[in-house]
Image (cartoon, rainbow, N blue to C red):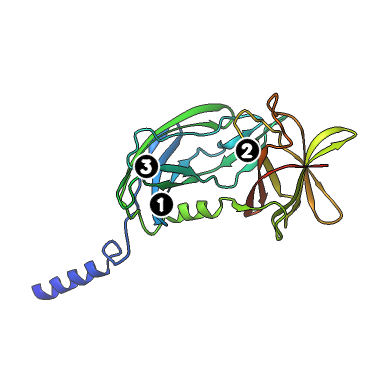
Amino acid sequence: MISSLRIAALCALAASPVLSAGARAELLSPWSSAGATSARLVAGAAEAGALTGGVEIRLAPGSKTYWRYPGDSGIPPHFDWNGSRNVGTIEVLWPAPVRFDDGGSASIGYKNDLVIPFRVTPREAGQPVELRLTLDFAICGKICQPASAVLTLDVPAEGAAPSPPALLAALASVPRAASLGAAGSPAIAVAELHKGADGTSIRVETQVGDAANADLFVEGPSEDWALPLPSRETGPDGRTTFVLPLDGVPKGADIASARLRFTLIDGARAIEVDSPLSVR
């Protein structure tokens, strides 16, 4: 009887997902609460010598937070990794955002819970990484309030595999890098400085699958640029053109030679193009 019970217990342990080969418990920091909002660090798998991870943010129902470029109003999240160890570089990978109509102005960001992925290149390959993050961000419901989270997570050299589903979904929503003029959809065919009778504007011709819901965000080469959100025109050739007035350019900046970053959202697909404007 005792022997049978021992055999049954051993079989149960062998079948346990915690001990099964290749499985690993999720590697997460404790939640850091900021009012009705909370945040934590999530570790993912190692890829090509780098560690993947994410900042998971839970928002109160009806609240929003902002993208790296918040639009007409808002405060972008600020990541302070001071105190982290064995960190060479950390690249934040922003999921595709949405535009919000704020009644007379527009902002760019996220609603509902989200994960903002990042990629860590260790200073010493093959060694553990200690992440220390102070995250300052804004939460907006009926009013906007500042929030801050202090997060810590120690990650082994091999990371946490497999990556959590929420992190994988966030990574899949990060716009892919593309070239100006590339074929396919979504695509940006032309980005030009247009001088017309109504003044100078930026015109961006795109190819998208869902013209009614596609959107475009344009950023300058530094934070002192504040380009407006564009309006949308759909032509008979099926191309969707986004037009934005030449506002928000720093004094003395050469718009004709500056490299701009274009983020084109087309439903669940998104691309990012880094290019100067042509002139017409």
> Would you say 248 lies left or right of 79 here?
right
- Of labels 1 and 2, earlier in sequence is 1
> Would you say 267 lies left or right of 7 here?
right
Q: Quadrant of the N terminus?
A: bottom left
In the depicted view, which residue is nearer to us: 104 or 63?
104
- Of labels 2 and 3, earlier in sequence is 3
Dot 2 crowding, Cα within 10 Å, few <14, some 14–19, many 20+: many
Q: Which mark is residue 170?
A: none
**Furthest residue in direction top, as rendered:** 251
In the depicted view, which residue is nearer to us: 231 or 251?
251
> Would you say 68 lies left or right of 4 here?
right
Q: Residue 13, image x and y in percent?
A: 22, 67
Q: Residue 129, image x and y in percent?
A: 33, 45
> Would you say 117 lies left or right of 64 here?
left
Which residue is labeled 2 in the image?
A: 108
Which residue is labeled 3 in the image?
A: 87
> Relative to 11, is 210 above or below?
above
Q: Residue 213, image x and y in percent?
A: 72, 49
Q: Residue at 37% of width from left, 39% of height from top? A: 31
Q: Quadrant of the C terminus?
A: top right
Secondary structure at badge 1 equals: strand
Secondary structure at badge 3 equals: loop
Which residue is labeled 1 in the image?
A: 50
Per the model, the C-alpha gap separating discs 2 and 3 is 30 Å
Dot 1 crowding, Cα within 10 Å, few <14, some 14–19, many 20+: some
Q: Would you identify the image quadrant in which residue 46 lies?
A: bottom left
Per the model, the C-alpha gap separating discs 1 and 3 is 10 Å
| Residue type (three-letter) at the residue carrying disc 2 | Ile
In the depicted view, which residue is nearer to us: 45 or 138?
45
Q: Residue at 74% of width from left, 29% of height from top? A: 247
Look at the image and tell me whether residue 1 can be seen.
no
* Contact between labelled residues 3 and 1, with CB atoms less than 8 Å apart: no
